[in-house]
Image (cartoon, rainbow, N blue to C red):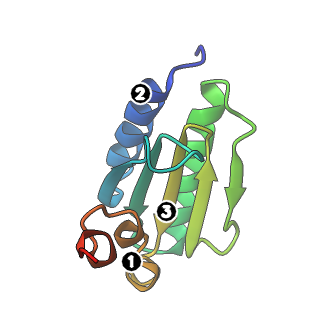
């Protein structure tokens, strides 16, 4: 498969996560908020084994699209796996770990510290 643009990569990752029964898939648009990536995708797996399988399948997908050098953190423990595919960053969590870190709230534009006026 040829390389794809950021939107195509996003769609391919979301489809793969959906096919693999990832839970609570959330897409966070980072354009204009962070120079590190355009999109962050957060999803949960039911167990360490499920998180590991999700990560493995995504890494294979990225390799198929010419992104075989994606940076990966969190393997082999699979409580929280981060995959940095350049324009798209993917966080895969076990549910308890996701609740603990609550990274979606960090990137939320309507969190209290950003909406209160001085």
- Distance CA(mark 3)–CA(mark 2): 20 Å
The answer to which of 4 and 22 lies nearer the viewer is 4
- Distance CA(mark 1)–CA(mark 3): 9 Å
Please indicate whether residue 37 sits to the left or right of residue 45 in the image.
Answer: right
Question: Is residue 50 visible from the viewing direction of this image?
Answer: no
The answer to which of 54 and 93 lies nearer the viewer is 93
Judging from the image, what secondary structure is the residue with disc 2 in?
Answer: helix
The residue under label 3 is: 92
Q: Which mark is residue 95?
A: 1
- Distance CA(mark 2)–CA(mark 1): 27 Å
Q: Position of residue 74 (x, y in %)?
A: 66, 68
Q: Which mark is residue 104?
A: none
Q: Residue at x 70, y 69 (%)?
A: 76
Please indicate whether residue 115 sits to the left or right of residue 36 in the image.
Answer: left
Instruction: Please tell me which of labels 2 and 1 falls first in the chain.
Output: 2
The residue under label 2 is: 7
In the image, is residue 71 above or below residue 103? above
Q: Position of residue 118 (x, y in %)?
A: 28, 77
Judging from the image, what secondary structure is the residue with disc 1 in?
Answer: helix
Judging from the image, what secondary structure is the residue with disc 3 in?
Answer: strand
Q: Quadrant of residue 1?
A: top right
For discs 2 and 1, the disc positioned in front in the rendered view: 2
Q: Position of residue 98 (x, y in %)?
A: 42, 76
């Amino acid at each position: 498969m040829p390389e794809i643009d950021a939107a195509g990569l996003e769609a391919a990752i979301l489809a793969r996560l959906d096919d693999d029964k990832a839970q609570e898939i959330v897409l966070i648009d980072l354009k204009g908020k962070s120079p590190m990536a355009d999109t962050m995708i957060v999803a949960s797996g039911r167990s360490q084994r499920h998180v590991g399988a999700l990560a493995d399948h995504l890494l294979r997908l990225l390799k198929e699209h010419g992104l075989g050098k994606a940076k990966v953190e969190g393997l082999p423990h699979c409580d929280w796996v981060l995959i940095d595919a350049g324009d798209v960053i993917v966080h895969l969590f076990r549910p308890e770990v996701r609740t603990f870190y609550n990274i979606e709230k960090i990137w939320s534009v309507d969190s209290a510290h950003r909406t209160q006026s001085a």
